[in-house]
Image: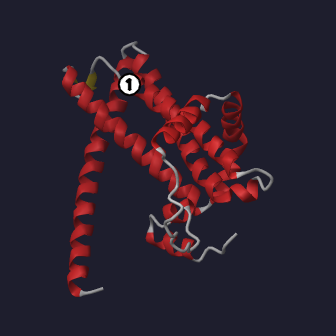
Amino acid sequence: MTATEQSESRATGAVRTTVGVVLFIAWGVLAFLWVYDAIYNLAHGVSGPAIKSLGTLLLLALLAGMEGLEVCYIHLWRQLHPDRTEHDLAAWLAARQLFVALIVVANTLLGDRPSIAVPFGGAIKGSLELKAFNLFFTTLLVLWFAQILPKHMAATNGERYLKLTRPTLSPVVEFVRRIGVSWPAEITAKAVQNRLGWHAEVTLERAPRRGEDLADAWAALIPEDGRAAQRRPEQ
């Protein structure tokens, strides 16, 4: 790496760190207000915000489990189900998407509050301000803690992650797959692809594979884990 590239890399790292810290601090303030509002209303006999907050956290825990499970299944599918095909994996992944869509929509509905209490007697009441609050807070809450974090954890230690989540979550996804919730999308995809001629370009030469998969990519999110992922033996 040249001196110019090193300088650009340091500058990029500084920008990423600065933006990340600012976003995390701003989100932390909103998280405090979110919790404070629930406690404040509960203390005044209004349980709605507290119930919504608890429901949001439970749904996020479910989403986090599903997101990490996706990484594990893609990486370990042949070891977990040696008698099943790649088509079965694709159908399982399609069924899992139900929970992503359902939980994101549910959390959007749960985040709709008439006001947000602020310490010392204040409150956020404006419609625009409340929508901005919910958009910023919920987006980062889902992104950081129900998307990136569980995917990285599953990629770093898939076997341990499966022990924690597979007995409970995998049968639920399998049930959704069996009853055909994703079937309309599969048929639509087939029709659209046939109409547009959307097929693999068999004439293009494939680049040689180096053994990477989705788990290796997510494990490399943290440099130390990335080096461990690169040393992972081929299974």
> Is residue 22 found left or right of 107 in the rendered image?
left
Q: Is residue 140 visible?
A: yes
Is residue 131 positioned above or below 206 on the image? Answer: above
The answer to which of 142 and 184 lies nearer the viewer is 184
Q: Residue furthest top?
A: 45
Q: Residue at horizontal 73%, vertical 42%? A: 167
> Is residue 232 found left or right of 84 in the rendered image?
left
Q: Residue at horizontal 28%, vertical 55%? A: 20
Q: Residue at horizontal 76%, vertical 52%? A: 81
Numbered circles on residues, count? 1
The answer to which of 216 and 11 lies nearer the viewer is 216
Locate the C terminus by quadrant. bottom right
Place residue 212 in its image quadrant: bottom right
Give the percent coordinates (x, y) of residue 79. 74, 59
Give the percent coordinates (x, y) of residue 234. 66, 73
The answer to which of 67 and 14 lies nearer the viewer is 67
